[in-house]
């Protein structure tokens, strides 16, 4: 094992100790149709469930349907070994020290990948408002 590999492993373990939040990353796998209601309900597969760290991003303005809206972003840090998250996955925030975030569902918009990263960074949007 090289010095760089052991150093990176050390810092990855240090980051994981800082994960005080919990989340579930899930991906839509299909949908089920209820003929009684005429509604389709998405089905999901869990990609990751466990410790994370949810950090706010800087809000930015955008125009949607000729109206100015504020985009709220969050960075969700998960352990580096979690390699499955993809763009458009959903992150259900299950537990945080900030109760306002509990229960939020965020949409993954970018996933950082790098040999030397110490965490996996999921850049997410909050499409629920609030």
Image (cartoon, rainbow, N blue to C red):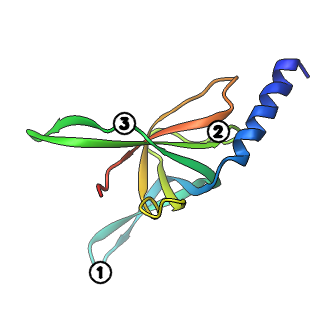
Structural crowding at the residue carrying mark 3, measured as other residues with C-alpha within 10 Å and reported as few (<14), some (14–19) or many (≥20): few
The residue under label 2 is 83
Q: Residue furthest left?
A: 66
Q: Position of residue 47 (x, y in %)?
A: 60, 51
The residue under label 3 is 58
Q: CA distance from mark 3 to mark 2?
A: 25 Å
Q: Residue at x 81, y 33 (%)?
A: 10
Local secondary structure at mark 3: loop
Q: Position of residue 40 (x, y in %)?
A: 33, 66
Left or right: 61 in relation to 75: left
* Residue 40, placed above or below residue 50: below
Where does the N terminus fall, quadrant-wise?
Answer: top right
Q: Earlier in the sequence, mark 3 or mark 2?
A: 3
Label 1 close to label 2 by CB (< 8 Å): no
| Foreground: disc 3 or disc 2 | 3
| Foreground: disc 1 or disc 2 | 2
Q: Residue at x 61, y 42 (%)?
A: 84
Q: Residue at x 42, y 56 (%)?
A: 105
| Foreground: disc 1 or disc 3 | 3
The residue under label 1 is 36
| Front residue of 124 and 43 | 124
Where does the C terminus fall, quadrant-wise?
Answer: bottom left
């Amino acid at each position: 094992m090289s010095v760089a590999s052991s150093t990176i492993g050390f810092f990855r373990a240090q980051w994981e100790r800082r994960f005080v939040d919990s989340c579930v990353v899930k991906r839509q796998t299909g949908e089920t149709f209820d003929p009684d209601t005429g509604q389709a309900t998405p089905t999901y597969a869990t990609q990751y469930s466990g410790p994370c760290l949810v950090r706010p991003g800087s809000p930015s303005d955008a125009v949607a349907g000729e109206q100015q809206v504020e985009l709220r972003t969050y960075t969700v840090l998960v352990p580096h070994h979690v390699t499955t998250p993809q763009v458009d996955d959903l992150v259900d925030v299950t537990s945080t020290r900030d109760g306002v975030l509990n229960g939020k569902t965020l949409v993954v918009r970018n996933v950082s990948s790098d040999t030397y990263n110490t965490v996996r960074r999921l850049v997410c949007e909050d499409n629920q408002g609030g």
